[in-house]
Each structure stands twice: as structure tokens, then as C-alpha cells.
Image: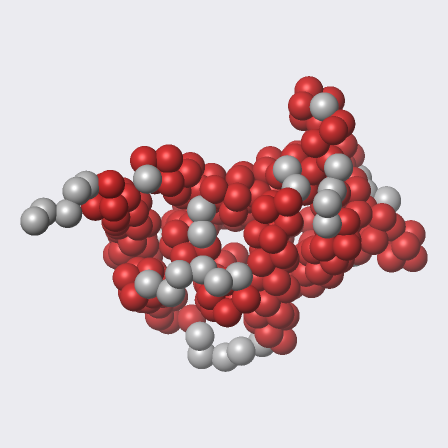
Amino acid sequence: MAEKYKNNLLGIISAVIASFLVVLMGAIGKKLGGELSPFVVVFLYSLFSFIAFLPVLAKRGGAQIRSQVPGLQALRAFVFALALVMWFWALPKIALADMTAIGYSSSLFTLVGAILFLGEASKLWRWTVLAVGVAGMLVILKPGFSEVSFAMVVIIAVSAAMALARLINKVVTRRDNPIGLVFWHGALTTIYTLPTAIIYWQSPTNEQWIWLILLGALGAIQQLFSAWSIKYADFGIIEPANFLKLVWAAGLGFAIFGEIPSITTIIGGIVIVGSVIYVAKRERRDARDLVLPTPL
């Protein structure tokens, strides 16, 4: 059971890092999405993400990219590519904090899907922690949901697609190495998005090329941490870590756009961080209780 707790902890840490990288990529994508076609951005993001990953592949060896479930790899990459196009289209049309908040519906889609289709344990305390995380999110965004734009609807669709991709990820990582998953993700999404990029091609400026290369590198790293988090822990354990995205969004909003977090953001952030810490401590306690002898 000590090994299970270690894996859960690794899963949580990986999920926290992945959540930060997603928000950082969102900030860059928000800038690029307003200047270039989303089809061009997604293609170049996928291409540079794939190229950035090649040194890792060279170091680990090509044998790790062999897939036992190539059909699922192809399906997962297609769903993710579709979600990326919608995401980059919507980013310039919606506030970063609103995008992050609406994106949390992906956690609900993922958790429900994992219980219904993957047979993960449906524990009351996991649902409770998720509910607490949602409460923290609502505290932060209480003054913002007066109207629902089409961009918000698109982000909900992105969340559903991302949840489906993550559920497929879980199945894939049971058979394939995470290194292979990231390799096929980069290769296939690049192939899928090439035709539309050619049709809607716009030549990036020198500055945009730099941002696109950085975006691709961050994407490769984020995919690795996301794959590791799913491999090591159940969705019910790692999903609360995704609520930290709002904390990252508030921090980046201040650092990049000069947005000062409100008191509700601070209070909600404390609630969210508390829920993540509780998950880690609860899993450690459960693992300890399982290995201790039952008193007579």
C-alpha cells in the first residue's frame, strides 16, 4: 500500500504541474489566437510540440513508441486535435478566468466517465472534495456568469472533448508507455491539422514564430506530465489538482495583463488549495489504514 500512496502522490504532483502548464499555454494561445487562424496555430503548435519531444525519444529509445492499441491512439489524437482547434478559436473571445472556470466541467465529465466506463471507485469523500473545489471556483467567479456567449458554449464542448481524450488516455497508458502516447499525440495531431493549415495559411511574424515554438515545447512537457498523472493515479484523486488552474490564472493574469485578484479570488484559491492538500492527506491515511493490523 505504501507503493500505492507513492503513485498517488506522484500522480497529484504531475497533475499540479500539468495544470500550470495548461494555463500558461492558454495565456500564449490567447495572444496568438487573436492574430492567426486557429488552424494555423494548432498545426504549428502540434508540429513544434512533436519536434520538441524528439530529443526525449532519442534518449529513451524508439522501442517505447510501439503501441498495442493504435486505433485508440488515432482516436485520441483526432479528438484532441478537434478540441484544440475549438480552444484556440474561443480563447481570444473569452476572458482567461472564465475560460478556466468553464473548463472545470471537464473534471466532472472525466470523473463521471471514469466511474461509468472505467470502473473506478465511487467514494463519497472524492465527490465531496470535488464539490468543495467547485464551491471555491464559484466563489472566485461569482460576478461573471450573467450571460452565456457562443464562445462559452464552445469551451464547454472543448471540455467534453478533453474529458473523452483523457478517458482514452487512461486506457492507452494501461497498455502503452506514456512516452509512446506523447509521440503519437504529436505525430497524429500534426498530420490531422496539416490540410486545414494549408487552406487557411497565414505566415507568422518573427515574434509569433518565437511564441509558437515556446507553445510547442510547453505542450510536449504538459502532455508528459498529464500522461504520468493519469498513469499513476485514478481520476478521482488527481481531478481536484485541476482546480489550481484558477490560482495559476489569477497569478498569470496579474503578471502578464496587470489584473489584480479580487478578495473572492483569494478566498476561492484558499479553498481550492485546501481541497488538493486534503486529497493527498486522505490518500495517505487510507493507505496507512489498509496496512495496519485490525485490532481484536
161 or 66: nearer the viewer: 66
Q: Is residue 105 left or right of residue 169?
A: left
Quadrant of the rendered image containing residue 214: top right
Residue at the top extreme, as displayed: 59
Q: Is residue 211 left or right of residue 278?
A: right
Q: Would residue 60 be visible to someone looking at this image?
A: yes
Q: Which residue is at 53% across, 40% downward?
A: 228
Residue 126: give x, y in percent of width and height: 33, 60
Quadrant of the rendered image containing residue 33: bottom right
Residue at the left extreme, as displayed: 296
Vertical side of 189 occupied by 87: above or below: below
Residue at the front extreme, as displayed: 296
Residue 57: give x, y in percent of width and height: 71, 27
112 or 19: nearer the viewer: 112
Q: Which residue is at 19% across, 41% downward?
A: 292
Q: Which residue is at 24% across, 41% downward?
A: 291
Q: Is residue 259 left or right of residue 2?
A: right
Q: Which residue is at 57% across, 61% downward?
A: 163
49 or 212: nearer the viewer: 49
Vertical side of 109 occupied by 1: above or below: above
Vertical side of 58 occupied by 173: above or below: below
Residue 188: give x, y in percent of width and height: 79, 47
